[in-house]
Amino acid sequence: MEWLQQQIQDYLPLISENRLIQASLIFLFAAIASRVVRIIIQRIQLHAAGRTANPLDDHLFSILQRPIGISILLIGVNLALKHSQLFEIQMPAIESVLVTIAVFFWLMCILDGAKFALNHLSRDDARVRIVQPHTLPLFQNMAVVIIYGAAIYFIFVAWDIDVSAWIASAGILGLALSFAAKDTLANLFAGVFILADTPYKIGDFIVLESGERGEVTHIGIRSTRILTRDDVEVTVPNAIMGNTKVINETAGPSSKYRIRVQVGVAYGSDIAKVRAALMAAAQSIDKVEATPEPRVRFRTFGDSSLNFELLCWVAEPVLRGQVSDILNEAVYNEFNTQGISIPFPQRDVNLRQLPSDD
């Protein structure tokens, strides 16, 4: 700014000695420069940013035109008024007003850019997973608070208002609020960390350490909601979700889920025949996935039976109960057809008659 003022003092007297004429020329030059810069930004947007697939740079150049042009014009007004020497006493207040106007236009520009960027990121899951459509209002509100706070700070500085006392008061107030709402803050931070780490997402089937199992229907800032298979919605605070073991049945390279059917057959049964019967039962059901293929395992020698386990896959965890029911029926019917006996526990009780005392 000082260099620019020196150039004005060196070259403007060559055009006119009248300070009002010189001030008018300064304002005119500033207006022309403002227009030229806006045209240059438009050309850059048209020929450079417009050729990219990312809409962020197009929007950035479009919203920068106005605040940059206004800033150049306000600088010209400041220099013109200073050079005219008509408002020397009022210049500090005038400069504060000009800075306030510039802060206002830059505030609108940054708010617009932040909201557009957050909206764009919420629709692009491959880039930032934490910014999602259901968390978009949170980040927009946080951006508004931060940007408005910075704008107010710069306005205070422009008017020579000491903000140290305000900051100290805000710190004390924030400390008091943090103690009063510690549980709410714990849920808030846990919700942000869950969204960032994504141990589960909406639509996943999860099992909590306490035993609840269901589909995640909502991940909020304060709590997570789970819809159980009984159509009962369970709401769990995020602070608990962030400090407990969560089994995600949907996570992994595939959404397929393996189910197990355990069955025992009588001692003396033909093991190869049992394996074939279990495989036939699994392959007769359409909802059992062909890949990975079903398999049969001979697990243990039980007290009354040879214990087998049929392992097969379904497309998603929600089918576990339905397919298990169909499989149990198919296995029972196949065993009856093949003449394979399913034993039940038996105990032999021997009664001894004690000799009489006579």
Image (spheres, grey):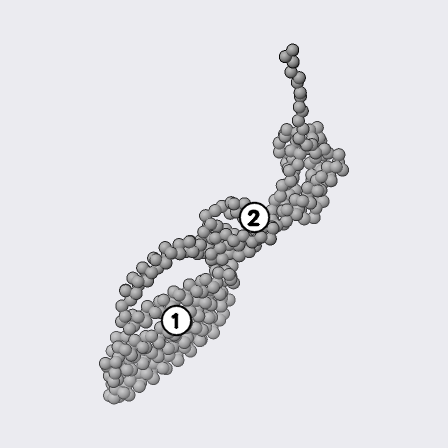
Rendered residue at 55%/49% (across/down): 206
**29, above or below 109, in the image:** below
Q: Which quadrant is home to the N terminus?
A: bottom left
Amino acid type of the residue tagged 2 in the rendering: Arg
Q: CA distance from mark 2 to mark 1?
A: 47 Å
Q: Which residue is mark 2?
A: 213
Label 2 SS: strand
Q: Earlier in the sequence, mark 2 or mark 1?
A: 1
Where's residue 352, x and y in %?
66, 18
Identity of the residue furthest to the top in this view: 358
Amino acid type of the residue tagged 1 in the rendering: Leu
Q: Nearer the viewer, residue 284 or 188?
A: 188
Label annotation for residue 107: 1
Where's residue 180, x and y in %?
38, 56
Residues marked 2 and 1 touching at CB (< 8 Å)? no
Q: Quadrant of residue 34?
A: bottom left
**88, above or below 285, in the image:** below
